[in-house]
Amino acid sequence: MDKKDLEKEFHMTGGAGETSYARNSSLQKKASDEAKHITLETLQQLYKETRPKKSTLGIADLGCSSGPNTLSTIRDMIKAIEEVAHHREIPNQPLPEFSIFLNDLPGNDFNSIFKSLPDFHTELKRDTNTNGDSPSVFISAYPGSFYGRLFPENTIHFIHSSYSLHWLSKVPPGIYDEQGKSINKGCVNICSSSPEAVSKAYYSQFKEDFSIFLRCRSKELVSAGRMVLIILGRDGPDHVDRGNSFFWELLSRSIADLVAQGETEEEKLDSYEMHFYAASAAEIESEVEREGSFELERLEMLEVDKETGNEDDDVSSYGKAVAKTVRAVQETMLAQHFGEEILEKLFDTYGRMVDEELAKEDIRPITFVLVLKRKL
Amino acid sequence: MDKKDLEKEFHMTGGAGETSYARNSSLQKKASDEAKHITLETLQQLYKETRPKKSTLGIADLGCSSGPNTLSTIRDMIKAIEEVAHHREIPNQPLPEFSIFLNDLPGNDFNSIFKSLPDFHTELKRDTNTNGDSPSVFISAYPGSFYGRLFPENTIHFIHSSYSLHWLSKVPPGIYDEQGKSINKGCVNICSSSPEAVSKAYYSQFKEDFSIFLRCRSKELVSAGRMVLIILGRDGPDHVDRGNSFFWELLSRSIADLVAQGETEEEKLDSYEMHFYAASAAEIESEVEREGSFELERLEMLEVDKETGNEDDDVSSYGKAVAKTVRAVQETMLAQHFGEEILEKLFDTYGRMVDEELAKEDIRPITFVLVLKRKL
């Protein structure tokens, strides 16, 4: 699947049904909550520093997806600025107008977000009424790949992106041989049996993509504008570890299980590749430095707390919670490649495998929170 | 139905199915083509005049709906500016970046528009390659009612709105009696049997809405920014004529027909009211003057040419074409009020009635094209 197809086909499961991303993004929310204080602190810092002359503060959420997280993140950010304004930390500074730019690929379910906007505005007005005037908030959607320009020059003050930037622009071309066959047989991403050329190809794609991302954003951000990027990563130089990569290793094994049972063909497993890369801190740092537009102000490592899932869910195990999350994220791609009929069984198997592995030894997926400042 | 419910429920039929707006907006397109030269001329004029210092030209389409008209309008506008730039009518002026702001109510099918964006960009690039560099075009959606603020202050250069502004923000409260019952029995809008209070209430709602519209847009437009508004109207002071109002008169009669056949209840017809108003040129002029932010540069009257419908349609009569158009525009509201099951029969009857009436005497629906300039 090339970049253009990916832009059309890759998206979280839409709507509000049983397997939708809207109802299965509690794991993302959990870790994102941990990253939240960094996000809001950075936003407030930026606001105090730049005191935008134009009365509009531009905030973009890249890879906003479609679910309860989408607008709750926006609400938190607006409140964080109101807090600064109401504490009168900046004298004679009226509350700015907010321009909120939501971004995701064109296949994202923006309609669902839009339908909840009237209620969102009503709540926002109610929440702020006690404090005085309620802010003007203009919410818009800019569909497109963030591995290209999204906004006009010099228009955004703050960029937030949560759990999106580990998705590459495409499956790296380097993992296909001259006949166009994947050399990464039996695996859906970098796994223990992958040839070294596979991790090299993925790393090289990450470098290319991340560098394009930084360059595009540096044009769109105002001087001293900030980005908070929350991405999955890995803890050291090894590409294969008992972290994020292990979840894909188990997805490969679950599909292999279906192959063994004759539910799908081996060839299909061999040709399925995920456009995912978990970078290390060193790789991120070196790419930010090489590209040159940004100063890396912070780089924090977080681990997702496994204790709780979504409270209204009847999820009885961590494995099932992971299975639901991975399904919401990968369902559209898997269904297109393998057919919808395998999904139920696949994710049953997958959830069970995660639980079995956890009983043996911990799995520690890692999240990085990056704070980047556009150089003056 | 109050304003807030309207904002959630009122939209053209989405998707690309048999009764969708996307496939049944050929009448709108037809007249819009006639208005096109005015639109593009005004846009070019604006561009030459304002020579935006910032390199971004902001263009908004209010009530963009979701269909082939949506992006083709945008394409025409971009080409019109390219033409000016390539003819070098402005020395040393590079092609601007385009910021395109699509607007409609939150229930509009924006997903369909977004899914066609990758192809739109590809075509745009191909079309312009012969002329040199292809323009940067940033397309966004700003869902919400245009009877309120949509964009930050001073950000838009040009506003286009085609066949949207005859939809009021709500059914005027003045047509309900103390018990909350409509005094406009048997009619879905102003019709020959309506009491005078009904047309007064509709006119008063139009004045309120149009004035709010002008005030909001005057804040959002840059100085000397332009609006081209294409709206249905009427030819003189009489509210009831053989123009747009007659189409609603026939819709009332078609529903009355179903009542007579026991397919729906009389009470339902009595309580159904459309939030529609066809203003006269004098009413429009007086409201623009009273509000005061805009200069009315042009006010043209157009009549829709009845000769041709959508070429790929198997529409055998003008009545059927009108029925399809009205259905795409009113389907969601009618279905909610009367139930979906009446729609087929209703629009069969309606199409037949239109043809019968046309055999007797012409029906002449009128369109106004307004060009408004924001005062300096």
Image (cartoon, coloured by chain):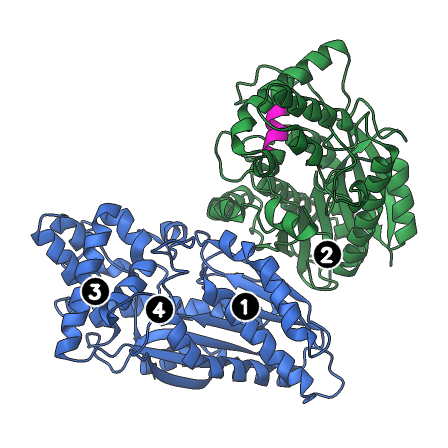
Chain colours: A green, B blue
Q: Is residue A49 left or right of residue B121?
A: right
Q: Quadrant of residue A342?
A: top right
**Residue at mark 2: chain:** A
Q: Earlier in the sequence, mark 3 or mark 1?
A: 1
Residue placed under numbered mark 1 in the picture: B60
**Residue at mark 4: chain:** B
For residue A148, which numbered disc appears in the image? 2
C-alpha gap between disc 4 and disc 2: 39 Å
Give the residue at the far top of this rendering. Answer: A359
Same chain assignment for discs 4 and 2: no
Q: Is residue A138 left or right of residue B205?
A: right
C-alpha gap between disc 3 and disc 4: 22 Å
C-alpha gap between disc 3 and disc 1: 34 Å
Residue A214 place in picture, x, y as percent: 81, 52
Instruction: Look at the picture and state if A167 lies above or below B151.
Output: above
**Predominant SS along the magenta part:** helix
| The one of B153 and B27 positioned closer to us in this rendering | B27
Which secondary structure lies at badge 1?
Answer: strand
At a point 72% along the width and 14% down the height, the residue shown is A357
Q: Nearer the viewer, mark 2 or mark 1?
A: 2
C-alpha gap between disc 2 and disc 1: 23 Å
